[in-house]
Image (cartoon, grey):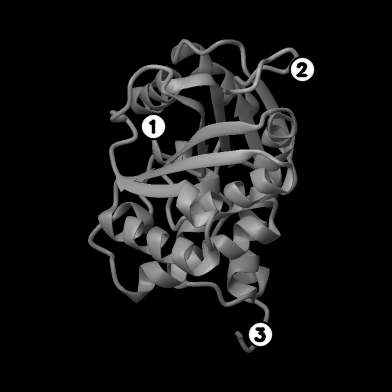
Amino acid sequence: MPSAVPALSDLPGLPDLSARLEAEEWMDDFSINDARLTRALRDLRRINRGLGGYAATDAVLDPLFRRHSRLRIADVGCGGGDHLAHLVRRGAHWGCTVELIGVDANPRTVGHARAHLEAQLRPPLRDRVRVQIGDALSLDWADASVDIVHAALVLHHFHGPAAGALLAEMNRVARLGIVVNDLHRHILAYVGIWALSRALGLARMVQHDAPLSVRRGFLRKDLRALARRAGLPPPSIRWHWAFRWTLSTLPQRRSVCATA
């Protein structure tokens, strides 16, 4: 643990958050594959658990888990596999057998995800999850071949036409719809994660990338514009604690039939 809480006087000048920042994070550099990456993935799990990352996705998917007996979900940009482990357990909690496919472009991260799943899940849950290397902009699946495509903290890594292309590709392979879980670009989120990552002594990569991620995050109008450019059906866009958005094209009515 750090010896002192960081002083806000150490915070660099407050950024202009009127527009998304187009910059790369250390996590975008696939040559970083040593202990720095391992610690960052560990701390991202802590952030998802403690700062509403899982809860935001749960708020959207729980109603489907309650009324479907079986679902096939792809997690694009699955990172260290924490959402995969959470979702297969969450489905089981509601009596839904969830088959999950995780995809990530970084081979080393895929290895970390597989190791995390082996450590966290036992049969039969572990048997329902697989992870593969793949390109989120060119998914190796047929149209409507999975029920739901989920992406958490992935969209903010894409800018310009690539951001819309990601949503369109997710929508192409999803039978029921997509769920995007990402960050609200807000000054309180920026200052909060800057201070918290230092106060908790999180990995240096997280201390660097987390505030930058907020600057790459979204306003509601940004998500609406991206959805239109991607040709999505009118989405549901919801705000969640702490400074998370979900964008979902999943059906809202109870009349949807469960997957066979």
- The amino acid type of the residue labelled 1 equals His
Q: CA distance from mark 1 to mark 3?
A: 37 Å
Mark 2 or mark 1, which is nearer to you? 2
> Can you say which quadrant of the picture contains the C terminus?
top right
Q: Which residue is mark 1?
A: 159
Q: CA distance from mark 2 to mark 1?
A: 35 Å
- The amino acid type of the residue labelled 2 equals Arg
Q: What is the number of the mark on residue 4?
A: 3
Which comes sooner in the sequence, label 2 or label 3? Answer: 3
Q: Is 13 on the left-hand or right-hand side of 253?
A: left
Classify 10 Å Cα crowding around label 2: few (below 14), some (14-19), many (20 and above): few
Farthest-out residue, bottom: 3
Of residues 109 and 204, the one nearer the viewer is 109
Classify 10 Å Cα crowding around label 3: few (below 14), some (14-19), many (20 and above): few
Q: CA distance from mark 2 to mark 3?
A: 51 Å
Q: What is the number of the mark on residue 116?
A: none
Which comes sooner in the sequence, label 1 or label 3? Answer: 3
Contact between marks 2 and 3 (CB within 8 A): the answer is no
Figure check: 140 above or below 199: above
Disc 3 secondary structure class: loop
Contact between marks 1 and 3 (CB within 8 A): the answer is no
Residue 183 in the image, given as x and y percentages of width and height: 59, 42
Q: Which residue is mark 2?
A: 254
- Residue at (39%, 60%) from the top-left corner? 114
Disc 2 secondary structure class: loop
Residue 110 in the image, given as x and y percentages of width and height: 34, 55
Of residues 243 and 215, the one nearer the viewer is 243
* Figure quadrant of residue 102: top left
- Residue at (46%, 57%) from the top-left corner? 209
Of residues 197 and 93, the one nearer the viewer is 93
